[in-house]
Image: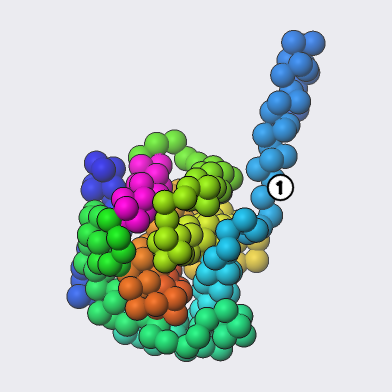
Amino acid sequence: YNKISKIMRKSLSLLFVALISVAIVSCSKEQLVEQPEVNATVQLRAAIESPANANNPYDYYGLVHNQAVEAYIAANAIEYNGTDLEKVIETSNALLLNSTDFHEYFQVGTLATSSMLAPLVDKFPDNMEAVITAGGASDPVQAKLTEFTNYFLDAMEGDEIVYADAYEYIIDFESSILSAKIWSSEDRERLLSATSIGRYSLYFWYHQEKTVGKGKGKVKGGNAEKRPWWNWLVIGVADVGGGIVGAGSGPAGAIGAGAAASNLANNLTKPDNK
């Protein structure tokens, strides 16, 4: 990815390695015929008010992930918002353990650790395949996760997209997993937990950077004006990567590493931390 290699290495890769690393006109009759189609598209995009997918049995991964990230962002004024990996993990894990929904859906186990996140810190975003391999999933699962993350990495090279584009792709991707008969229960959870984390994370960071960061009640972590448009995609894919490497230690590891990766990627891409 030429654009990623030239731009993102400056804003992400070096930082990750250093840690160990958003007119009304008169219409003719012909224009009026086309107008309903445009409005339908706008309404469809505006209607995506939630990242949920009730068809995904592992949707709760993304739900709990976002709750943990929201807690981290809200606590930034009194907690840690720097780029030290160990401090980010310590703060992120502590806030996750305070989540009621975490205890409802997950058994307490190994959360994020620096060794767990090392492949992400070392390889993201230039070698996402290595990150996925480090998760220890089966080869077919790794191939599907590579396909999934490549969609967003490729999107960074093209025209700006919006969350509705990402949401539509993920829903279709999840439908293909759910309809296929080839996946074991473990493989299906590996895939659908990763897509759930991505779907929720992208929703959060898109709105954080495109809405909050544009001045509507600023929250720490916004500053969209100073970040490239695709920064929300970068953080979302990093979260997916965290969930993938953490899944090797179980569900708690997946959610813990996904949340910690989100907080770390956000901190690293803050203009004040570069």
Q: Which residue is mark 1?
A: 47
Q: Return the x and y of residue 29 as percentages of the image width and height.
A: 79, 11
Q: Residues within 10 Å of mark 1 (few under 14, many from 20)?
A: few
Can residue 77 be seen in the rendering of this structure?
A: no
Q: Circle 1 sits in a helix, a strand or a loop, which is it?
A: loop
Residue placed most toward the observer, 99 or 110: 110
Q: Return the x and y of residue 244 as percentages of the image width and height.
A: 36, 66
Q: Magenta region's main secondary structure?
A: helix
- Residue occupying the point 39% across, 36% down: 158
Q: Is residue 34 left or right of residue 78?
A: right
Q: Return the x and y of residue 121 as percentages of the image width and height.
A: 26, 69
Q: Is residue 58 magenta?
A: no
> Where does the magenta region start and end?
140-155
- Residue occupying the point 36% across, 50% down: 144
Residue placed most toward the observer, 33 or 12: 33
Amino acid of disc 1: Ala
Relative height, residue 135 to residue 25 (above, below)? below
